[in-house]
Image (cartoon, rainbow, N blue to C red):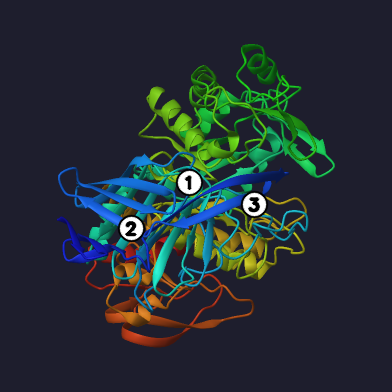
Amino acid sequence: MLRVDVKGDKLTVYLGERPVIVHTPDAPFVHVGKGVGRFRAHGGHWRVSDGQLRRTALTGAQYDAGRSAVRFSGGDYSLTFHLSETEGSLILTTQRASTGLNRIWLSFPAKSGQGVYGGGAQYGGLDLRGHRVPLWVHERRVGRESARLPLLRASGHHATQFPHPSFFTQDGLFVYLDSPAYGALDFRDARRHRAELWELPSAVVVGVETEIPALARRMSRVLGHQSVLPYWSVEGVWMEAAGGMPALVARLDKAVSAGVQVSAVCLRDWSGRRETARGPRVFYDWTPNQELYPRLDKVVGELSAAGVRTLAYINPHMAIEGRLFAEASMAGYLVRKPEGGNYINDMGGFMAGHLDLTNPDACAWFKEIIKNNILKRGFSGYMADMGYYLPARGVLQNGESPNRMHNRWPVLWAKLNREAVREAGRANDTVFFTRAGYGGSCGQTMLTTTGEHNAGWGAEDGLPSALTASLTLACSGMGLSLSDIGGNMAFSARRSKEMYLRWAEYAAFTPVMRTVSLPGQLDFDTDEEILALFARLSRLHAALAPYTHACVRENAGEGRPVMRPLFMEFPQDERARRVTNAYMLGGELLVAPVMQRGRRERGVYLPAGNWVHLWSGKAYIGGEHTMDAPLGRPPVFYRPTSRFVEVFENVNDAATNN
């Protein structure tokens, strides 16, 4: 229950017995200011700075119980928040503010030593304590940091394609900022958690729970949640193929003959390909390419009948040589330049225009492209890529500044795709997945990738960073994510056999197991040894499908992520909170992947209780254990009381039998 207590100069807002806002003149809840933001973009990467900034502490606070409003004031400025309670959460909405205010800093009480989690896809660690996290959708420059644009660097808690304006604390405080503006979450002060925004927010939502499952449900109600993936999506590998129909058929035949359980083939170049100085690229004209893939509709149908789905690829950009660019240009569906004409950018060796996602007619037109060229042709889904690239100087149909719409852009892109799938009547059997997101994305996208990762062992850009990103996304309301086996970038790195197989065995214990090919790099079918072990892991992944899909349903219904940090399952276990290199797959399976080169054993912490080793069937009790970890068999344990014990007991046999 919401309660406001005023004692002298001190104002405290309670949810139940928990103080969630504490204001005094010496430690005010609100600072405000005026600034002039400067945004520079180069190749999808950003430098953001603030000029002419004036910051003022609002030291005074007056509470109007009749109107349920608090007026904060200081210097020449004032700001009035209306306080309301919805489903047990405090909602702060701006009622009145001094003219011209476009900066706000809010301070929430913190407890020393308490962990802080969320912020979207992060790569430098699970606990955000001690870090400042920018809230700006930003492509990572994995392995290729730019000296020209250093402010949002490519590692740690900085550059991410999926930031999220929310966080929660170890003791159950949850905060969500409803605003698309640039901002930051700042956890460097042990006494308070600070949130910064470059506009006054539409709303600030604050919630409190004492139990993690209840907190997950509360976050899900506020942030939205993903729908249930179709069962086929967790029954085997999503295998990427490219280069045309003969290459597709040959790769699929080789995989199936080797015993790989293939649930889907991903045709990134279904719309054609082009050669650039940076290598082969997809042709951005979202129509089936008959030269590369003749009889594509028939082949898609035949594969589906054989139990193999087909996935496509699309993004909201159109190559200037294509038919769709001409249509969009004629109809005025593209982002425009200030001086007139379409905004055209180099997209990596070729030029393309950008769909204006604020234009309802443009969105309706593009949804028809998705429905007619992808869904009605039998595809079972697609990657809805990018969504983060909006020119900083573009002119939009809705009249908004691109800098204000920038963080909203991937949400609009996901919304367009979700609507297209639903309007086509394909919501129950189709998957689309995205790479970028922000506040609002959790309720729009079905599944997201963990972004760009180098083909190596780097803690912040290689295999370990894929796990970190999945767990930080899970702490931000995004309970379904996937990574690309072997990494999807190769800067100053090459895929090794060991690294690739370690990534594959990790992916086998995630919701979706997906391959991506890199030119000149080894792949799952490079040699017979890799192929044989990969095939076994794919069958293991398929054997876990009854359990995995139950976890997917739990995520959709309860907001509990499929992959979750140990502390989300064991919140009272202080040791579990410090574990960042293992995770729970659902509530019954503990996975400790091997993510360091040359390791054939690793230490595992098991929380209190009884556990069974997946591979040997040997019983263990909680505590520290050193486990053998040969390739293909990372330490994995299940609870003997699980209703899925029979599934776990049969995994070895199912994976071994071809």
* Nearer the camera: disc 1 or disc 2: 2
The span from disc 3 to disc 1 (Cα, nearest Å) is 20 Å
Q: Residue furthest top?
A: 330
Of mark 3 and mark 1, the one earlier in the sequence is 3
* Nearer the camera: disc 2 or disc 3: 2
Q: Position of residue 334 (x, y in %)?
A: 63, 22
Nearest the viewer among 298 and 220 is: 220
> The N terminus is located in which quarter?
bottom left
Of mark 2 and mark 3, the one earlier in the sequence is 3
Q: Position of residue 459 (x, y in %)?
A: 60, 70
The reply to whether discs 1 and 2 touch (Cβ–Cβ < 8 Å) is no
Of mark 1 and mark 2, the one earlier in the sequence is 2
Q: Residue 191, can we see it?
A: yes
Q: Secondary structure at mark 3?
A: strand
Q: How many numbered tags mark residues here?
A: 3
- Neighbour class for label 2 at 10 Å: few (<14), some, many (≥20)? many
Q: Residue furthest right?
A: 277
Q: Amino acid at mark 2?
A: Gly
Name the residue beneath numbered marker 1.
438
Name the residue beneath numbered marker 3.
49
Q: Amino acid at mark 3?
A: Ser
Give the answer, above or below, for where 99 lies relative to 332. Answer: below
Image disc number at residue 60: 2
The reply to whether discs 2 and 3 touch (Cβ–Cβ < 8 Å) is no
The span from disc 1 to disc 2 (Cα, nearest Å) is 33 Å
Residue 354 vs residue 93: left or right?
Answer: right
Give the answer, above or below, for where 481 lies relative to 318. Answer: below
Residue 366 vs residue 479: left or right?
Answer: right
Q: Amino acid at mark 1?
A: Tyr
Residue under the point 24% across and 67% down: 642
Q: Position of residue 29 (x, y in %)?
A: 36, 60
